[in-house]
Image (cartoon, rainbow, N blue to C red):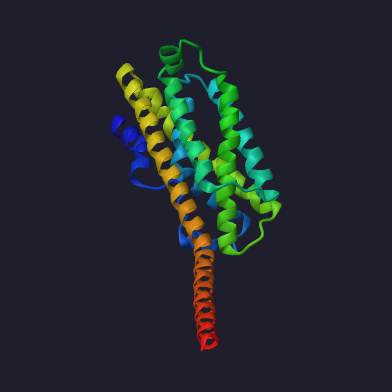
């Protein structure tokens, strides 16, 4: 059991979160509402950063009321931003929002390790409030990916399609919790708890570096693509000016030479 959960915790090391296959992009072009539910569930189950954050949230919870309370806060928050951001076409840079989601994983692992008291000598911020805030950010991540796939599929998303995708996300979240919470309940232990939460912190850092590297790489590449046409135009302009100057110089030189004769 411990090996199984450790493998789940290490999933981010072997793949990029939120990978969307070309087949999914093609299928979404003429998908039914049931298909959108499936896409939402698939995206949540394969969204390693979302899964890691959920693991961090439920890690030390011991009763179903606490699970319901925290997961409800997370669910309401990500539903708000997923539905409204997608419906109104509000977009953010995918790499940056995923970097913030990676930070949420680091935060939860750090909080679970009692890092605020040990490192800062203060109590942690209100957990439900933080889960709600990070839920809003996770919802933006889900919305950004859904809008990217919709653009790639050349479709305009309706409210019903967005809601169906959101329902699928909730099904995926429930499926993850059904697997994770019983495993955590069976194998909790002092050493396991500490090591597992350090894995959360390290995995979050890896994801954070990955997303920031992707952002700066793409940003630099995009900036260079914008500059190249302007640089080429400037180079041609300088060449024309230089040729013009040479021609003017030669013309004046010839005129002065004839005038002296």
| Residue in the picture at 46% in, 16% down | 116
Residue 211 pos. (x, y %): 44, 44
Residue 254 pos. (x, y %): 51, 85
Residue 45 pos. (x, y %): 47, 44
| Residue in the picture at 35% in, 30% down | 199
Question: Quick check: 214 above or below 51?
Answer: below
| Residue in the picture at 32% in, 24% down | 195
Residue 152 pos. (x, y %): 56, 62
Question: Quick check: 223 above or below 48?
Answer: below
Q: In which quarter of the image is the N terminus?
A: top left
Q: Which of 3 and 117 is in front in this view?
A: 117
How many labels were placed on the picture?
Answer: 0
Q: Which of 196 and 1 is in front in this view?
A: 196
Q: In this view, does 7 lie to the left or right of 133?
A: left
Q: In this view, does 80 lie to the left or right of 107?
A: right
Question: Quick check: 209 above or below 55?
Answer: below
| Residue in the picture at 35% in, 33% down | 5
- Residue reaching furthest to the top: 121
Question: Quick check: 21 above or below 236?
Answer: above
């Amino acid at each position: 059991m411990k090996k199984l959960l450790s493998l789940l915790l290490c999933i981010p090391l072997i793949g990029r979160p939120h990978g969307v296959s070309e087949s999914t992009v093609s299928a979404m072009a003429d998908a039914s509402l049931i298909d959108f539910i499936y896409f939402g569930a698939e995206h949540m189950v394969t969204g390693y950063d979302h899964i890691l954050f959920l693991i961090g949230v439920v890690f030390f919870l011991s009763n179903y009321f606490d699970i319901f309370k925290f997961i409800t806060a997370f669910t309401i928050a990500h539903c708000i931003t997923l539905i409204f951001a997608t419906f109104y076409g509000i977009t953010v840079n995918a790499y940056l929002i995923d970097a913030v989601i990676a930070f949420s994983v680091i935060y939860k692992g750090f909080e679970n390790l009692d890092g605020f008291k040990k490192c800062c000598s203060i109590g942690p911020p209100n957990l439900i409030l933080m889960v709600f805030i990070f839920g809003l950010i996770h919802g933006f991540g889900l919305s950004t990916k859904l809008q990217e796939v919709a653009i790639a599929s050349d479709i305009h998303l309706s409210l019903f399609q967005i809601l169906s995708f959101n329902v699928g996300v909730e099904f995926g979240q429930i499926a993850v919790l059904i697997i994770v919470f019983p495993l955590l309940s069976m194998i909790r232990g002092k050493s396991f708890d500490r090591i597992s939460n350090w894995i959360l912190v390290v995995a979050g850092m890896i994801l954070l570096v990955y997303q920031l590297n992707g952002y700066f790489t793409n940003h630099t590449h995009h900036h260079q693509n914008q500059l190249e046409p302007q640089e080429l135009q400037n180079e041609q302009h300088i060449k024309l000016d230089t040729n013009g100057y040479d021609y003017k110089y030669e013309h004046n030189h010839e005129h002065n030479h004839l005038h002296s004769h």
